[in-house]
Image (cartoon, grey):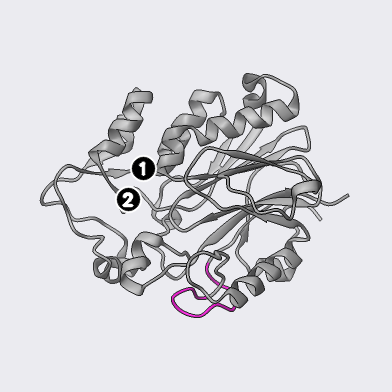
Amino acid sequence: MDNMQFTNALKKLGTPVAWDAPHSVVAHMTQRIGGVSTAPFDSLNVGDHVGDDPRAVVANRSLLTQALGLTPCFMTQVHGTHVHLLTQANATLSVEADAVVCATPGLAAAIMVADCLPVLFAHKHKPLVAGAHAGWRGLANGVLQATVQTMAAQAQCSVGELCRDVHVWLGPCIGPAAFEVGAEVRAAFVAQHPQAHACFELVEPTQPQLFGDVAVGICAAAGLGSVRANKYLANLPALAQLVLSELGIVSVTGNDASPAWCTAGNPDVYFSYRRDQQALGGSGRMAAFIGLQAC
C-alpha cells in the first residue's frame, strides 16, 4: 500500500501525512485519540516516561506497530542533536537521540512530541527517510542541520544536493499564540539567524495570550495566560522554516502556524505538555512516524 492507503485500523490512530513523498514512504501522525490509556494520558499515549501505566503504553505502541506494518524506533529524546542511523541490526535497541535516519525497508522512526515540532524528511528519488524532534533547544543547536548531514552521507552526495532532493513535513506543535519564551531564547536564534527576529513577538504588559475559545479555560488553569515582562511569543514552525530555507530546502509542507496545528489550543485532538502538566498532573505523547514499506 502507498502512503495514502492506510488500513482502517491506522486511520483510527491519527492521520496520514499529506505530502509529495514517494509511494514507498509510510508517514503517519498520531493524535491523542484511539488508545487505551486513562486520564490524563487518554488515550493514545506512546510515551513510556510520563507516568502512564506501562501496560497501556505497550498496548498503544502495539496497536500502532500492527497498523503501520513497520517496526518503529522509539528514542529517548533529550532535546539534543544526536542523529541515530536506524538499521536492522539496531532496530530493537534503546537509543538516546533526537533524530533518526533510515534507509532500511520495514523500519520506521518514531518522533514523540507533546509541544515540540516533529519534522519528517523523505528523499524524492532514493529510499531514504528521516525524522527529527525539534523543540527550541534542538532547533537552536542544529538538530535539523545534523539530520540533513547524516542523510547526505547515506545518499553519498553533498548537503546542497541532498537538500534539493528532499520533501519535508512539519507536524503539529505549540503555536505562536501560546509559546511564551524568555529573551534568551530569542537571542539564541537571532545570533545565528538574523532573520529570526521576525519569528518572535514581544508580549506587551497588557496583552493576554490567545489559545482559541475551546482551550481558554484549560490554558488559564495551567497558568499559560499569565503575562510577564521580557517575554516573547515564538513561532516554532517559522523558525524551522527559516533553518530549512537556509539549508536550501524548498519543498516544505504541513504546519503553517495556524490555530488548527497548535497542540496547546486543541485539547480534544493533541497532547500538550505546557497546557496539561500543571493543570492535570501529566501529559501524554503523540508520535510522528516515517519509514519505508517492507519489501
Q: Is residue 95 magenta?
A: no
Front residue (pair 3, 116) = 116
Q: Residue furthest left?
A: 206
Is 186 placed above or below 231 here?
above
User: Callout 2 environment at 10 Å: few (<14), some (14 to 19), or many (20+)?
Assistant: many
Which range of residues does the magenta coloring cover?
32-42
Residue at 71% x, 51% y is 108
Image quadrant in which the N terminus is located: bottom right
Q: Position of residue 262 (x, y in %)?
A: 41, 56
Cα gap from disc 1 to disc 2, whole angstroms:
7 Å
Q: Secondary structure at mark 1?
A: loop
The disc at residue 235 is 1
Residue at 11% x, 49% y is 205
Identify the main secondary structure in magenta: loop
Residue at 68% x, 26% y is 152
Q: Earlier in the sequence, mark 1 or mark 2?
A: 2
Is 40 left or right of 68, judged from the image as shown? left
Is 170 left or right of 258, judged from the image as shown? right
Is 241 left or right of 103, judged from the image as shown? left
User: Callout 1 environment at 10 Å: few (<14), some (14 to 19), or many (20+)?
Assistant: many
Q: Which residue is mark 2?
A: 179
Which picture quadrant has residue 233?
top left
Is 43 placed above or below 258 here?
below
Residue 24 visible at all: no
Identified by mark 1, the residue type is: Asn
Q: Position of residue 157 (x, y in %)?
A: 72, 21
Verify CB contact (< 8 Å) between mark 1 and mark 2.
yes
Q: Is residue 38 magenta?
A: yes
Q: Residue furthest right?
A: 295
Q: Position of residue 137 (x, y in %)?
A: 41, 41
Q: Position of residue 225 (x, y in %)?
A: 22, 60
Residue 211 visible at all: yes
